[in-house]
Image: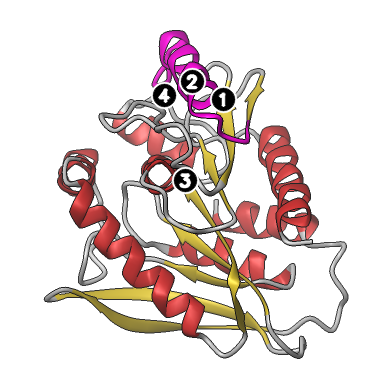
């Protein structure tokens, strides 16, 4: 399964110069008294400052999938920080544990904001990053996190959610959202209902947010992750990889970044 993901990553990055050299390493930072263990990826062949991108992990925690997405962004010319929203680099092997980790953060917006802001500050301070050019992307749990950070008014250029939850207890308020918003959703995802989609669109429009919602026919939850098929079968969950939706959403993300960082 890992080899399939790496093959997809190579195809998606094919437009990059062959001399691109990406390095990645773990980084420690603090949010209050909590040690957070992130992963930063940088393209060493690019001189000068460039936009930075935060990558927020799925409910499994900061695993290899989030790290690989950070490296793919570095191949495109960004400096990317895969963030740790659970603390101590914790990851889950079972949906029950993953759900507990995710709910602790989802139910505590001040905690989520503190941990996200700590990662944001670290990325902005990196010598390769233009501090005023920042975006955040997230997958599943991470998608819901970046949407909440946009709703909370964090001063970043844009956020993009991939198969993330749209529901919120803190709806966007008119004039409060600074980031432009993109949502990439599986049209057949049973975890995101039509009612939730309608409510999200109404929320965004009422708040005057610059947003775009994209549905991918035939795609369900975790459509960007090649490991989703195995996890879906193992835990009897509606998860499945969808190569076309993965490729199309990644291309749309690149176009989105070209718009917000020009």
Q: Mark 2 points at which residue?
A: 189
- Tell me the SS state at disc 3: strand
Secondary structure of the residue carrying numbered label 4: loop
Q: Residues within 10 Å of mark 2 (few under 14, many from 20)?
A: many
Q: Which of marks 2 and 3 is nearer the N terminus?
A: 3
Residue 193: name its quadrant: top left
In the rendered image, which residue does mark 3 sit on?
A: 139
At mark 1, the secondary structure is strand
In contact (CB < 8 Å): disc 4 and disc 2: yes
Instruction: Specify the quadrant that holds the C terminus.
Output: bottom right
x and y percent of residue 192 in the render? 43, 20
Judge from the rendering whether residue 156 lies leftward or rightward of residue 152; answer left or right.
Answer: right
Q: Residues within 10 Å of mark 4 (few under 14, many from 20)?
A: some
User: Magenta segment, which residues?
Assistant: 189-211
Q: Which residue is drawn at 49% across and 21% down?
A: 206
Q: Which residue does the numbered mark 1 point to in the structure image?
A: 186
Compute the Cα span from label 1 to label 2. 5 Å
**Coordinates of residue 251 in the picture (x, y in percent):** 76, 46
Query: Magenta stretch: residue 197 in it?
Result: yes
């Amino acid at each position: 399964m890992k080899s399939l993901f790496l093959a997809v990553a190579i195809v998606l990055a094919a437009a990059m110069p062959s001399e691109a050299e990406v390095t990645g390493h773990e980084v420690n930072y603090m949010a209050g008294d909590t040690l957070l263990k992130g992963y930063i990826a940088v393209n060493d062949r690019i001189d000068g400052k460039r936009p930075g991108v935060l990558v927020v992990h799925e409910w499994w925690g900061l695993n290899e999938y989030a790290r690989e997405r950070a490296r793919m962004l570095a191949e495109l010319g960004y400096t990317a920080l895969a963030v740790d929203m659970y603390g101590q680099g914790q990851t889950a092997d079972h949906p029950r544990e993953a759900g507990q980790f995710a709910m602790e953060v989802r139910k505590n917006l001040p905690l989520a904001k503190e941990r996200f802001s700590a990662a944001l500050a670290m990325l902005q301070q990196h010598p390769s990053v233009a501090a005023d050019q920042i975006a955040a992307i997230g997958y599943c749990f991470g998608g819901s996190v970046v949407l909440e950070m946009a709703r909370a008014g964090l001063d970043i250029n844009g956020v993009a959610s991939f198969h993330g939850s749209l529901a919120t207890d803190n709806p966007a308020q008119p004039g409060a959202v600074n980031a432009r918003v993109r949502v990439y959703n599986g049209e057949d995802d049973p975890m995101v209902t039509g009612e939730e989609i309608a409510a999200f669109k109404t929320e965004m429009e009422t708040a005057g947010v610059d947003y775009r919602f994209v549905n991918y026919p035939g795609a369900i939850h975790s459509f960007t992750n090649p490991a989703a098929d195995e996890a879906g079968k193992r835990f009897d969950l509606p998860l499945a990889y969808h190569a076309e939706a993965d490729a199309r959403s990644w291309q749309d993300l690149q176009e989105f970044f070209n718009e917000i960082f020009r």
